[in-house]
Structures are given as C-alpha cells and as structure tokens.
Image (cartoon, coloured by chain):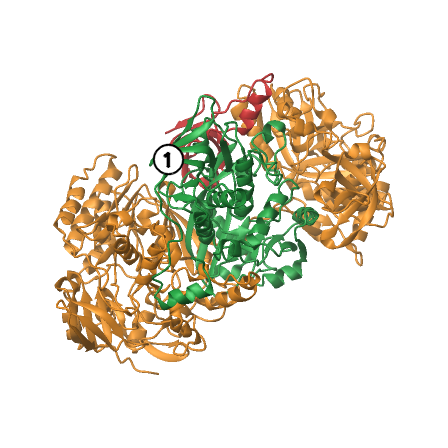
Amino acid sequence: MQYSVTSLVKQALRGHQGWPEAFRHPEPRKHYDVVIIGGGGHGLATAYYLAKEHGITNVAVLEKGWIGSGNTGRNTTIVRSNYLLNSEIPLLEWSLKLWEGLSAELNYNVMFSQRGVLDIFHTDGQRDEAVRRGNAMIMNGVDAVMLDRRQVLEMMPLVDANNGRFPVLGGLLQPRAGSARHDAVVWGYARAADRLGVDIIQNCEVTGFERDASGRMTGVETSRGRIGAGKVAVCVAGHTSQVMQMAGIKLPVESHKLQAFVSEAVKPCVDTVATFGVGHLYVSQSDKGGLVFGGMLDGYNSFAQRGNLPIVEDVAEAMMMFLPSLGRVRLLRHWAGVVDMTMDGSPYICKTPVEGLYLNGGWNYTGFKAIPGAAWCFAHTVAKDAPHKYNAPFHLDRFAEGRPVDATGGGPFPNHH
Amino acid sequence: MTCQTHRLNGTGRCLNRSKPISFTFDGKRYSGFEGDTLASALLANGVRLVARSFKYHRPRGIFTCDPHEPSALVQLRSGARQEPNVPATMVELYDGLEATSQNRWPSLRYDLLSVNQLISPFFAAGFYYKTFKWPAKFWTSLYEPVIRRAAGMGRLSGSIDPDTYEKVHHHCDILVIGGGAAGLSAARAATQDGARVTLVEERARLGGFDSTGLEQDIAALKALENVRILPRTMAFGWYDNNTFGAVEQVSDHLPVPAPHQPRQRMWKIVAPQVILATGAHERSLSFGNNDRPGVMLASAAERYLRDYGVRPGSRAVIFTTNDSTAGLAEALRAAGVTVAAVADARNGDEIETVHGRTAVTGVTLRQKDGSRRTVDCDAVCVSGGWNPAVQLLAQRGQKPRWSDNLQAFLPQEMAGADFLFTGSLAGLEAREDCQTHGRMAGEAAGKRFAARDSASLADYHSYLEANEARAAKFAYFESSTGKSKKFIDLQHDVTAGDVSLATREGYRSVEHVKRYTTLGMATDQGKTSNIHGIAAMSKALDKPMSQVGTTGFRPPYRPVSLGALAGRSRGKHWRPILRTPLHGWVEDKGGVFIESGLWHRSQYFPKPGETMSQAISREVQAVRSAVGFCDVSTLGKIDLQGPDAAAFLDRVYSNGFAKLPVGKSRYGLMLREDGIVMDDGTVSRLAEDHYFITTTSAESDSVISHLEYCHQVLWPELDVVFADAGEDWAGIALAGPRARDVLVRIAPEMDVSNAALPFLAAREGTVLDGVPARLFRVSFSGELAFELYVPSAYGRPLAEALEREGAEFGITPYGVEALDVLRIEKGHVSSELNKFTTAADLGLGMMMSKKKDFIGRALSSRPGLTDPDREVVVGLKPLDPSHSFRQGAHITARGAPLAPENDDGYITSAAWSPTLESHIAIALVRRGRERVGEVVEIIDPLHGEEPVPATIVYHHFYDPENARVRS
Amino acid sequence: MRIPCPLCGDRPLEEFVYRGDATLTRPAADAPMEAWVDYVYLRDNPKGPHREHWRHAQGCGSWLIVDRNTVTHEITQAIQARPGGEVQR
C-alpha cells in the first residue's frame, strides 16, 4: 500500500487496522542471484538498488539480528558531503543528492532535514584547513559557505564566545547537509526493497562461505541452513574482519567503539548540526527535542557496544566549554557502536580477491551519511563486477600501491582517524 | 495562599510541621512543610493537573512517588538556574521554590496543542514515516519546524549555568547500591571482616520504601567507622573493571548552593566488589484513560499517606493484581478516604476505563461476570506488581531473565563479574526476607574481601531459588475490554494499540517496536512502560514474555546533568594553558598571544599605534637588517644518551647521524613507517654518546611516544636512554646580521667567532654569569642565527639581558608571525609537514639515506608515493606583488574551469614579504617542480574572489645560496 | 577500564595511550614489499583475546603488552614490552 494522505485518512478512520506489513518475514529460498550479508542501511539499500537500478530482484538480505540493529540504528545521523579530497567528495556528494530525494523515492519519510552542518574552527591552522576544504568542495560542485565569528554566533546563539578555553574564529557551513531519522532509513529501504521482491531474512546468521573448486563463491552457510548464491555482498559494519576471515581475507581494519549521547528533550535550542574543531564534539537537536552529540573513539579495539567514562566526561566537558548554558540539561542515554576503523579513515567498496565476493565496509565514523551513495555504487559494483567511478578509489590494494584516501593524515593508525 | 486541603493531621513521617514552607507553581502561591517534595506539597494542596504529555498534550498528574516519575515533570527555578523536566517527586521543597508547568501554551489548563488529542487517530505509531513527504522541500521548511516547536519538553534558560560541579575519585572494598532494608543489612554485614564499605542511596533518606522500624539499623550503620554513606547519590553507570559513576545532589534541595559548594558532585567509584540492592519499581496496569490526573501507583498513594500526610483524594478505587496493596485500603480509610471499590484482577474484576479529563471523576468497573458499573471517585490506586530494578546490571550487557513464577524480569549471574544482588531486585518482597538475604550477601562479600574464594554462596543462592519456587504471581497486564486509549508509556503517549499496530506492520522485534512507537524512550527510559510494551507484544505476537525479551538498558540509570559530568573542566579551565618561561616577560612587553596547541605563544609585539601587519613587518625587517630574538621554548626537547645513541638515531631519522661529529648540529627528518613525514628538527651531538634533539612544538608528545616505542618495543637491544627535556630548557632564537655582536656580550665565556662556532656548530657553555647553556648555530630565519637554551628559570633573565645588551644593535623581540614570514621567505617547510607529504614532496628527497634502514624507508618506494603527479612544494609570486594569497586557496592552470580534475594543489603558507616587497606563498602543486616559471591561477571561490595570477617559483625566495647563515 | 601497570599498579584508562596489535613484528630491512604492507596495514582484529600495546603515558612512560579481551574488556596480563620487564597478572 502506498503511503499517502488518502491512505492515512482511510486507515485512521478504520483504526489503522488495514496497514499491511512494511516488509515480509519470508523463509529463505534455496538460491539467490545475490546474497547480501548484513541488514543495516547499507545492506538493505544495496538490495534496493540492485533491484531498482540493475533489475536483479532475486536477492536476499541476511541479518543475524533485527534489521538496523547495528550502527545504522545507533549513530548520530549526520548527513553531509563536506569532505576534503577529490577522491572522496564525489561519492559523498552523490549520496547527498540521493538523500535529497529519498523520502519521495522510498515513499517513506526518512526525515532528512537540511539544517546545515557547521564546522566551527578555533585556530588559524583549523581555519586554513577549512579554507582548503571549502574550496575543494566548491571545485566538486558542493555547497560551502565561510562564516565569520559573528555569523557563527548568530547560527549558534548558545555558543559561549567569550569564556571558552579556545576562541571561536569562524565556521565552514554546508547548508544542504543535515540529519535524518536513522531507523526510518532502515525501514524505508527495507520496505522499498521488499516491494521489489527482495527477501529480508532476519535472525539468520552467516556461519561460513561455500566456494567451488575454482574458488568462486557459491553460497553461504547460515543458522537457518545453506543458501546458494551467485554472488555474495558483505555489508556488516563492526564485524567486517570476522566475516571476511571466513573467506580467508585479512583486512586493514580494526574494530573500535564510538559512543553517542542523547539528552532529555528540550524545546528547540540548537538549530543546525555543529561540530567543534577542538574537543572533537558534534551536536545537533532531534525533532523530538533531544540533543544528540558525540566525540572521539574510546580508542582501543573493542566489540562491546558500551563505552567507558573517560569519553563520557570528555564529551561533557567539551559541551560545557562551548555551550555552558547546557549544564542543567540531563544526559538521557549513552551507548556505543562498533565501527570498522581503517588504515586511512576511508571505506572499502570493492571487489575482493575471491571471485563472486564483494565488500562494502570499513566505514569508520561515516557510514550513515553514505548509505544511499555507497549502496548505489556497491550495487553497481556487484551487478557489473566492476566499480563505478565514484567508488573506484576505495579498493583494498590502495595501501600496497601507496594511494590511501587519508583526509585527516592520521596514517596507518585507525584510532587516529 | 491556598490551604492544604488534602493534608492529614498527625501523619507524615518525613514532615517537619513546625517549618511551613511557601512555594509557587505556575505563579500561584502554595504552602507545604519542610520534608515535603514538590509532588507531595502539590497533592496536599489539592493540585491534580501538573503537566501535559509529550505528543497529545493530554492532562497529566502525579503518578508515582519515585525518581522515575514519567508524568509530573516541571520546570524548576527561574533565571539562569532554570531547569527543565524535573520530576516533581524528587524535588525537596525549600522556601521560595518556583516551579512551572511545561510543554503547554498558553496555560496548563487551556493548552492549545491539546487539539492533538482530537486528531490523535492520525497520530498513531509510525505516522511521521507515512506522511509529510509532499512536496519534498516542505519537510525542512514547513512541517519540521512546526513539529520541532511542538516537541521538546521544558525550556532552557539560555544563560550560562552559574553553579559549579566537582568530581571525586573514591575507592572502597565493597560498594552497596541502594539504601533500603536489603542494602542496609548488606552494608552492615559486609563490614564485619574489616572491609571499607560505601553505600549510595539516590533518595535523601535511607530506609527504602518504608523505613518504619529501621531507624536503629540506620543509626547503627552510620556509627560504623568503615562505612561511608552517600545519600542523594545516584549510581548512574557501571563501567569496566567495576568503575562506577554516581552523582551526589549536594545542593539541589537548597535555593542556591552554599558558598563554595557545588551544585552536584560526581563520584567515580572503584570497588572490587559490589552489592546491588537497587530495589523494584511498582508497575501500573493498562486500561482505558489510565493516564488521567488522579490515577496513581498504589505504592505512591501509600507513601504519600504515610510519609507526607497527604491523601490522594476523598474517594478512591484500588485496582490490583497482587498482595502488595493489602494494607492500602485500611490506610486510606484510616486517613478518612472512602474506598469506593477494590478491583482485584485475580478475582476477574478490572477497571475498563477512567472518567474525567483534567482529573479523575469516576471509573467503569467490569466484573468477572461481564457486568459493568460506574463508580464515582477522585483517585485510582493501581498496582500491577513489581519490576526489579535491573537497569544498572543490564548496562553490563546482561539480559534479564523472565520468571513466570514471579512474573518479572530478574537479574542473572554473570561469569567473571564480582557482584551480588539482593532485596526486591532479587525478587524478594517481605522486609524480613530482604534483610535476611541482604545479610547473606553482605557477609559473603565481607568474607571474599578478607580471603578470596573463602565465601560460600550456597545459602545466598538457595534463598532466592526457594523464594522464586514459592512464588505464583498472577499474570495480568491489560484490561480485557474498552475502547479508550490504554497508555503504556505515559510521557510519550504510547498506547497498547500503538504496540499492536507496530507488530501488525511487521515490526516484530522488541527493539523495532520501541523505535517505531518511541516506547520507553522518555525520561524514565521505560521504567514505567517497558513491561507493558513487552506484554502487549507478547499478546500481539502470541509469544511468551521470555521470548519477546527486553530492550537494552544503557547508562545513565537516571538522567544526569551535563554539568556534573563535566565537573570543573569548563570555560577557560577546559584544558590547561601551557605558558613558556618567557610568558610573563612577553606580557610585560605588551606582546600579543596566540593559541598554538595548548600553548599560548607570543604572536607579535605591537608598538603604540601599530597594526598587526605593521608590527610583523617591523619585526621581520629588524631581523633582516639588525637582530631580533624569539621565544622558541615550545619546541620539544629530548636528551638522548648511551653508546647506541647514534645507531638509534640512524633508525628513527631518514638521514644519517652516525657520522655527525661531536659539536655539530644537523637537520633531521623523521618519517612514519608509511613513508609520510612525521616531524623535523635538529639533532646536536654534544658528546660521543650524548645528543640533544629538538622537535616541532605540535608533535613533541607524539615524537617522545614514538621514540619510546622504537626503543622499548622495536629495538630494546640498543643501549640508549632518553628524557623529555621539554620543560627543562627555555629556548631563544637570536637572529640577524648583528646576532653575534649581541651573543658576545651574553656569553662572554664562550668563543662565538665564526671560526670557533661555524654554521651548525653545537656547544655547551655558560651565558650571563655562569648560567649553563646550550648553544646551537642553526637558523630558521635564513640569517646568521643561534638557538640558545638555558634552564627554564633563566629564560626571563636571558630575555632581559638580550634586550639590554642588544639595545645598541637595535635588537627587537619578534613573535611567531614574524618567525613564520622569515621562514617562508627563506623557504623552510613548516605547515607543509601536514601529514600528507613525503620527504620528496617537501623537496627533501636527498635526506632519504640509501645506506641504512630507517622507519619509513621501505614503504616510501611504493608507486603512489613516488608518482611524478604528486603535489610538491614550490613557491608562488603574484604577477602583481600587491595581490595577497590566502592559505587554503587552490591552484589551477590559467583559464582552467572550476573542476576537481583541474585542482593542481593548494597554498600551505602565505605572507606579505617586507624583504621582497611582495606577497609570497609556499604551495603544494601537482608536478610543481617541473612547472617553475609557469603562470597559474590562485583560486578561492569560497571567498568569492577573482583568481589571482601567480608565477611558480622555487620556494627558497631569500638567499638561496645560503650565504647569510654562514656569515 | 583499569590497566594493571607492572610498575605503577592498577591505574585508570585515561592515563594510558593505545597503539594496537602487539603481535606484529617489524620486517627485516630486506623483506619484500608485501611483508611491509602486511606489517603496517593488515590486522587480525580478533573478537576475543587480543595482545596489544599500551603506553602508560601519564605514568611511568612504559610501553606495555596487555592481554585484553575485546568483547568483555577483561585484562588477564600486563607486562612491560621490553624484555626482562615486570609482569602484572
């Protein structure tokens, strides 16, 4: 059933008894043309684009828990394409363009809110980096606006410009950037993929790969039995190393945890998504009224979806330096996601050394915003057995070649990105 | 002032009736007593309607007597101390207290957005996802702003929080969380073997649900020396290795904090063992209009009667499923309240729906035989049983276990974790059981403290098993009939119907239902609602409760103010300010400071009437024509000694050091293992086995860490030791053609002639009157120059001496701006070491030794790092010298359209060169060295500027022959 | 989290700086390029027991080899990285 004003009115009058399931709960079939491992935003969107853009509809998405249970459902939902390098901007900008039409395309309101992302800088060095980045964005057709100190304070009136340890010098604003409702992205893609014939199979954990004599992928072993597959596409943020290891592939990845925070709901007080160049703080306010914020990685390998106090304190301290009127706002909840940190801070969206096995992973902090664009490119890569030009730089051989996509210059230390 | 219509005579264990207190709610004045909470005082005054719900703006009253009150949230205080979303149940009344209702307009009674109730049929779960999509741009411009204004709860003051917060580290042997009957017994027993015990209790008073008769126990515990009791302290988080976060509400019960007292204090508690006695939360039941003001938990009614001398109404109906309400009817009657009906679900009786809008006026009862009757009443007391407070434990990732016998989720043992749980958290009910088992837990912990593995937990376990085996709780969550909304999550207006809609739409996981309906995401984090959501799912999916399971619980146990989590690290105190030994001198000279990492460095020294750029140019010219000096104390300094020091340096620097003679300095380049430049600096050999290294200011810590790694991990066989000497030495660069003339006077005991101290010479000696000094003839400015290091305490005297002795030669102090201009003119790289560049990119390829292995050597030969297309360091001069450059501007070929493939690089350093009388820049340019002489365009579309034509030149603008440094 | 520094005792997480996998061995100078790429970039990244390098930066400055479980964060051993150093279990 199409979601529309008409259907909504009709259903409201009938007590909402007639809404169909947003997506089916099918039993797995014996064989699929493509099996996608991981029912997060990337996996579901990849299925959707395989069906929609490439006509490949005999597709299953296998999810070991419930769809969206990984990082898609636990991130701070920032969507932006304010990147630095010419090798990375096109992918993120394509993603942002897809975001702009996503609610209509999926017939599901993902609440993409273009309230802008404002990167505030505090030192001359950070300003120079912002200028370099803003110009790179504009050269790539991305919107970028330089704000002076006064303009930053107008956008973020709660920022204490006078008493902080570091001054507020200005900011780089991307007006088209913003935030979205994370769960809606999962459910919207799931529903749209399901309507194109994709089977979404929850509570189905992949336990092994099956390959023929030539080494080609032929299927997967799962907790619900063997499933044959023409191609296998992996989108399992947080556990990419573990899944790829089943195919004998060791990756340039470390799993770390990143914490996220939400406060009690208060009336609107932060209208944009703001990041602070010192303190590694980012903050926005959800439509519900909760302040959503985060900071740095905890910094050590971890698969635990819970954080430790030092980062909690760090983030609160940064909040209180920049936004000291929030001292009486209460933290409602904090949690952690397991992120695949890579050796250059950039993802892998590529073919792998195993024929028929494809990888979309290593998203560091940045997976959510990339869901539409990366999944679109990944579907292209799977369907054509070759990357699209947008994801061509994001292959596994780039380290051997000496061509990392390293925007922070952090080098081969995943916790520095 | 209204009178306390609902106050009883005589009762009220918490009250001090001799101290009346005056307070206001929504501007209206009321009175209460010392010991009241805001909730009890409002109830005493007959105030029912205190809040509006989040979504439908339905009228809401006081539902609990608990910290996790979901409905009665108010805005407390005014001005900068205004605090949103405060549960009235936790506010201790003080004289002059101001509270207002929130999330309503124009008033609590007449809230315009209560129109949402009328259109609530459209507002079912998932409503937002299905609508507001047409047309797309209206979401951001129209729909969303309306939704945002309607959402949210309380309002912030917008002013800086005037109160302070502090933090304490605390270590104890056994931590007891919860000061009810079980916790008190456990704490006391735990001390018996000498353990230091700390007990935290979130409420102001110990004793738990009913402290009657516990007074002696409390006094006895307080008298023990090895017990610390922290009331008003809520353990909010349980982190790795038994590290707990707790917040003490030091001053929230006062109008303002006492002088020098924080508002709240965060405790970071480390305890090898913990006993959880966090109690249980009474649950409500799901029936029509169960959210009306006047509907209240039975335990709350009991507490208000007993502890606060407040009756919940005049005619009450009790709706229950269990024995915990056994005494309530009697207590109500004793208080003069008529008990109009008792609907016991175990007998098949239930409340179908509640009547009344802003207050309860009656209920429709449905009896076992199906007959209905309406009963007039003004209070409904509900008990659906008790939920053990497993939230803190569940933070460790433990999934609670469903017990059919107890009809509740219970904590489980967890492998490898040192904790015990007791009291109603463990499913116990009777106070005697809680005390007995609490004692068992305490004794076991005490014994384990005294001698590990000595305690048997057999009794502790069997006691709980027996209790559970005995229990036969009645399974009942929702009334069987009725069309009115049955609320599950009172704050978020989630109904039983929303849950079943979600499951019909395919959202079958408990997490999906939570997220689709927002169930359990309110300020109480599901403490009052989750169980009913699970029960509704169990019914809708026809699955047992145990298979539906719970959602994850996360810290904090109860919301914690950001102020408390930040403590004193705010404002200027967010991070330390690093000051050099010359800081005070620079201040006295009127120097301007600039942030540089955590340092405050001298930026420039303006003379009266001078602009910044005038000052910088004057400083530069002084160095070029006479002499200047600059504070370089922020440079990292490392003292390195040992027979293998040379071998060690050879491995960590790309260029060689084994052949560096004693008494010489050499510029060194340090790479990361991936071939990217990490840092540069000078290495000076002071003796055969003794080196002095400088690093950049920014990387000093990471270089130390890196060198320690190389030494301790990679090559422990090398006999070398080093010390971070960063804070030991003040450093001053003395530069300019007259530098030697000044130095002669400063260092009379050293021979500083060109013959004795040639370029790159390194000496130890004395300056002034025998002050030990290290003297290096190195130059960043391109002039004859020296770096002088003296013990930090002599930094200021040295600066003063330089100023005095150099006056005759026109000596001028200069700051980091002039320093930067000088090095740009000279073409030294600095900001070009930006973590993107290789040695070759920087024009320093010759520093990559081919004779030895070193960190970064192997991977430097990868094709991507040797690609001729890489961006390399060059200089830029504008065709028109007055055209300025901006750092971060990009470079394109002349006339090339604005496109990424035409992006030829960017400017890393730019300055007005007073020496060359032109703007100049250093840039990283694709194939730059091949393009010297080419005219390119400098573009800065971000600032909307016209392209500036500029010529690519070698970046050594000034004295490329290097003659001046040797003069 | 708390790390048992062999020299300083049980100390809180915030005093330490993390580096990562301690099982890697720097290749010999003449090792092939693949060995260097593996060393610098590839990680086992185990879910479970992990041997890793930490530096007690705000303490004694020692580089430590810590055996820690990446799921439970339980630490079973911490020793000084340099041979012959102290061990803390």
Q: Residue at x 45, y 45 (%)?
A: A40
Q: Is residue C41 above or below residue B825?
A: above
Q: Quadrant of the N terminus of chain B?
A: bottom left
Q: Which residue is mark 1?
A: A30
Which is more toward the observer, B728 or B630? B630
Q: Is residue A379 left or right of residue B767?
A: left
Colour assignment, chain A = green
Q: Is residue B534 left or right of residue A161?
A: left
**Few, some or many residues within 10 Å of mark 1 (<14, 14–19, 20+):** few
Chain letter of the residue beneath label 1 in the structure image = A
Q: Amino acid at mark 1?
A: Lys
Q: Specify the quadrant of the image occupied by residue B660.
A: top right
Q: Is residue B450 above or below residue C40?
A: below
Residue C66 can be seen, yes or no? no
Q: Quadrant of the C terminus of chain B?
A: top right
Which is more toward the observer, C82 or B417? B417
Which is more toward the observer, B368 or B16? B368
Q: Is residue B748 left or right of residue B380?
A: right
**Residue B244: x percent and y percent?**
37, 47
Q: Residue at x 24, y 46 (%)?
A: B191
Residue B718 can be seen, yes or no? yes
Colour assignment, chain B = orange
**Residue B331: x percent and y percent?**
16, 70
Q: Is residue B673 above or below residue B428?
A: above
**Residue B662: x percent and y percent?**
71, 21
Q: Specify the quadrant of the image occupied by residue B130.
A: bottom left
Colour assignment, chain C = red
- SS label for mark 1: loop
Q: How many marks?
A: 1
Q: Specify the quadrant of the image occupied by residue B234.
A: bottom left
**Residue B605: x percent and y percent?**
75, 51
